């Protein structure tokens, strides 16, 4: 098992069922056992916030927190807001390395997901 935490970050919604997707993803990744700690977080509209979730990761005793944007593109939230959040957490916890991953973006596996969703809709 890694000594790293996985911090999954979504925008956040007032609709609990929308936020449940990230909670589900976190649970599945947690069950796989690769990460010492897996924590969902939300940019706005619900909790835990990125700062709160980052604190939870640090409290779990990790040496590194990999922050994964659950966003499709590198828009303002990813480029500015998440970069700033990473910087704040790193400043508060200099002994822990905070790394911001790329958004889902143009990952080739997304093509398969989009095609599958289109096939499902067309049936």
Image (spheres, grey):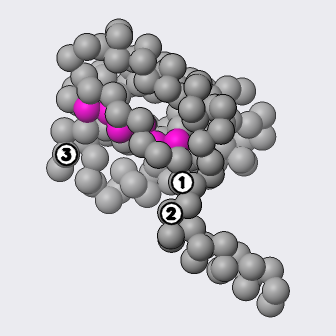
Task: Identify the image quadrant of the C terminus.
Answer: bottom right
The residue under the point 20% across, 29% down is: 63
Work out whether residue 75 or residue 117 is closer to the camera in this orientation and state it.
75
Residue 2 is marked as 3
- The crowd level at tag 2 (other Cα within 10 Å; few <14, some 14-19, many 20+) is few
Sequence order check, earlier mark of 1 and 3: 3
Q: Quadrant of residue 88?
A: top left
In the rendered structure, the answer to whether residue 8 lies left or right of residue 16 reads: left
Give yes or no for residue 65 being in the magenta stretch.
Answer: yes
* Element on which disc 1 rests: loop
Q: CA distance from mark 2 to mark 1?
A: 6 Å
From the image, give the main secondary structure of the stretch colored magenta: strand
Residue 75 is marked as none
Residue extending farthest to the bottom is 123
Q: Which residue is mark 2?
A: 107
Q: Is residue 28 visible?
A: yes
* 123 in relation to 11, above or below: below
Q: Which residue is mark 1?
A: 104
In the rendered structure, the answer to whether residue 39 lies left or right of residue 96 reads: right
* 119 in relation to 99, above or below: below
- Please report the bounds of the magenta region as a residue range: 64-69
The residue under the point 57% across, 68% down is: 110
* Element on which disc 2 rests: loop
Asked whether the residues under the numbered discs 2 and 1 touch, taking CB atoms below 8 Å apart as contact, a structural biologist would say: yes
């Amino acid at each position: 098992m890694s000594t790293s935490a996985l911090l999954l970050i979504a925008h956040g919604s007032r609709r609990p069922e929308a936020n449940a997707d990230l909670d589900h993803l976190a649970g599945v990744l947690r069950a796989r056992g690769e990460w010492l700690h897996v924590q969902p977080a939300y940019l706005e509209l619900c909790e835990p916030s990125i700062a709160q979730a980052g604190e939870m990761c640090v409290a779990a005793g990790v040496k590194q927190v990999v922050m994964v944007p659950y966003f499709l593109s590198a828009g303002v939230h990813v480029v500015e807001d998440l970069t700033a959040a990473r910087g704040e957490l790193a400043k508060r916890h200099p002994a822990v390395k905070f790394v911001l991953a790329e958004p889902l973006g143009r990952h080739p596996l997304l093509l398969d997901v989009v095609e599958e969703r289109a096939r499902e809709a067309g049936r």
